[in-house]
Image: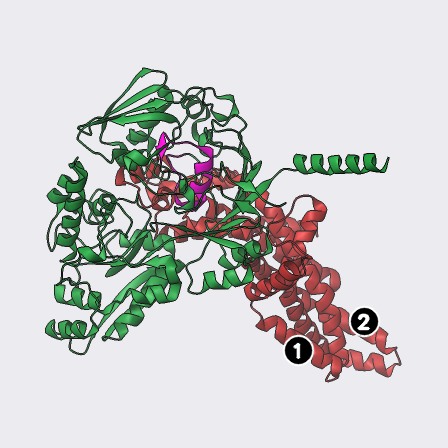
Amino acid sequence: MIGYILRRLLEVIPTVLLVLTLVFFALRIMPGDPAIAALGEFATPDAIARFREKLGLNQPLYMQYFGFIAQSLTADFGTSMNNGAPIGDLLGQALPYTISLALAATSIGIVIGLPLGAMTAVHRDGKLDAFGRLFALIGFSLPDFYFGILLLLVFSLHLDWFPMLGGGKGFFDQLHHLVLPAITLGLVMAAFTMRLTRSSLLEVLKRDYVRTARGKGVAERWVIFKHALRNALIPVTTGMGIYLLTTLSGTITVELVFSRPGLGTLLIGGVSARDYTLVQAGLVVFAFFVVVVNLLTDLLCAAIDPRITLR
Amino acid sequence: MKLFIHTCVAALLLSTAAMAESVVRVGVSQRDIGSMDPAFGIGNGDEFPMRQIYSVLVGPKNGTSDLTFANLQGELAEKWEMAPDARSVTFYLRKGVQWHRGYGEVTSDDVAFTIARMRDPKTGTAYSSNFQEIVSVETPDRYTVKINLSKPNPFFYAFALMPRFGGYIQPRKAVEELGEKFRQNPVGSGPFAFSAYESKQKVILKAFEQYWEGKPRIDQLEVLFLPETAARTLAFVKGDVDMIEGATVPGWQASLKKQKPTTVFDAGRPGGTWALHFNMTRKPLDDIRVREAIARAIDQNAWVAAFGDFVTPTYGVSPVGYYGALDKADLPADWPLLYDPAKSKKLLAEAGFPNGLTIEVFITEREEYKTNLLIIQEQLRKVGIQINMRVVDHTSYHNDIRRDLNTMVVYGSGQPPLTQAVLNAFYKSSAIVGKPTRNMNFSHYGDLAGNSDSLLEQANQEIDDTKRIALLKQVQIEILRQIPAYPLPSAAGSWMHDGKTLEIGFPVKAYMGTFTLAKASRLAP
């Protein structure tokens, strides 16, 4: 197991290198000049030239690239091109907010989606199933930015139960600020988990070993939870791993709607200001998350089903 | 005994209220601070906090945009005088004005240092061209500064010394000591001192006890970055922020007023300079008949209908209210920019487009730009001109229009409210895109369809006020007869505050980044 984890972590290196290369060149292909974005409409060509020189943007592209790779390998992302703030500090401030949002949304997705999916499969075509399908339909149909604004209108503006802006300071205040953004993202995840669990469980319930268990007189609850659900969870876990990555991207919109700090807010600001160093660092962190989530998903699948071997 | 208890409780409540910090929160549409160093600050997000942190020598009167020399209001300077030949200006500084964080007294050396820093190409500021006419700065004593110019310029101060355009005086000691860190740790002499910055979230400023006009009544000022219009509006309606930057969306203000009747709309006038620039190197816009056909198809009343009295029609290159602007009464009878759709169709037919034509245009995603082009698109459709619009992000837009890639450029700019500033920026031949200047002459006027450089220079240097205004109007008429651009209606600076909780201290008729909140007070917790 430890050997497998180490091997997988080593695989991260070429993946991150590839991401670094793609990010570096994609940003430079994009139209727009960081110097104009930083200096504004009154910038003279002289000022623009000095800005480019100061940040090394006048160097040949291959030199900029190797400089960037060398810096990244030492985890030194430098300073923001736009405002000179150290990128390590900016990421350090933003990451806890994004991670807590993604985890809270995933927890909501699991807590609501899994039991609802299992119950709708067991009571197929019943009232509960109809409710579950309606829930999934609503969850998938509501765009997160719109749903977020609706939540803000009802629970923040009118009822004044939750704050409208920011990420909060201190544990309880942060938790208070987390509720609405987490529900916004978590509801879609719950709908996804519910649909996945339902279809996966329905598939498993048709299998021979389930019929055999029932024939042997095993209690129905035991059949479902011990035999069927455990096997149904493997595709659900894989699907949720993939969806967690989508949720990470989803934090970008939600952070904007709730004016919340985080990686998304940082990246959007960086892209619009053509802050190459900031966007590069942010995307590397995103790539790192993708690799880690994939690894955790594999480990979780192996834990659920011992027949899956980790090689 | 009962009376004693009541007195004690009342005293306790009063002292608690007195001790409670009064905090005012302001929501701006910018995503983050760029810089708090006056050499590099741009946009509202930077301008608003910078105006509170720094002081200028002289500025327009609180809440106004009046740049007339006689009407200026002193800040660091208590007295000032211009030489009769407009080749030098002398400022006499107030004594005892302090820098924040114990950096000592503001002296003439700081003023000389600021000018030298802003002029120096090595600094890399975007505002360096505003200081190029200065040939020398004399500091005969700690409180006197004489600025000498290379040629007469009675409005020199309006470009180099005003808020928003690099005119904030900076402390030599702090700039030299902090170096690169100065942009995120600014030291000024304004009513509020920098306290903290949270990336992409907010800047926190604290009242400066030693401010020369006395400590501000607000203890803490927070500038929040709220780029999403919906989030900014909801936060204002709920009362989480006391003042916000508005949105240029038809009906937005009416809807806000309905939701929050205590809203006070602070219309900053005169508004920004907006125009539709025709790239005269491109066909069919090289044909003056096509340009006139477009101009004749646009009715500025459409903007008034959409935005109400927040917009005003523009007749010359600069909005009404700018120094030297053209008014309706100044327009000749045969003015080619007057709305006349029948004539527009006739001109199109004469130019060889009896069935209309199609023009490809790209535009930024920003609301104010897109809204302007959408209104134009709808109007031109009625005379048979189809605008195919492609939306790009704002940074790409600024990049590509300066590479001369667009056919028609919608452009809005926050120039000093002087017509000569607009003429210099958009109609001088040296400003044509691709030339080594500010690159905002998108029409190529000066190289194509005429040249008004010498007349403009004459206006810039004219000392007599009446003659100068006459020259400025003459230049505009000469330029606009060739229709290198169609001036669009000017929208007032759209800010609003809650009249129930915040009192600014004077009527607001100027952009929010041009005056301080030194006299503002919080009316309720």
Location of the C terminus of chain A (image quadrant): bottom right
Please, what secondary structure does the residue beneath circle 2 have? helix
What is the x, y in percent for residue B93?
37, 22
Residue A235: image quadrant is bottom right
How far separated are the C-alphas under marks 1 and 2? Answer: 24 Å
Q: Look at 78% across and 35% down and name the residue there.
A: B7
Residue at image mark 1:
A134
Q: Can you tell which mark lies on residue A14?
A: none
Residue at image mark 2:
A225
Callout 1: chain: A
Residue B482: image quadrant is bottom left
Question: How many numbered discs?
Answer: 2
What is the x, y in percent for residue B398?
32, 52
Graded by Cα atoms within 10 Å as few (under 14), some (14 to 19) or many (20 or more), the crowding at tag 1 reads few
Whether label 1 touches label 2, CB < 8 Å: no
Q: Nearer the viewer, residue B288 or B190?
A: B190
Q: Is residue A220 left or right of residue A242?
A: right
Check the rendered structure and report the hue given to chain A: red
Q: Is residue A189 left or right of residue B247?
A: right
**Residue A311 visible (yes or no):** no
Q: Nearer the viewer, residue A284 or A230?
A: A284
**Residue B173 visible (yes or no):** yes
Which amino acid type corresponds to the residue marked 1 in the rendered image?
Answer: Leu
Q: Which chain is green?
A: B
Which amino acid type corresponds to the residue marked 2 in the rendered image?
Answer: Phe
User: Magenta part of the protein: which range?
Assistant: B38-59
Q: Upstream in the sequence, badge 1 or badge 2?
A: 1
Discs 1/2, front: 1
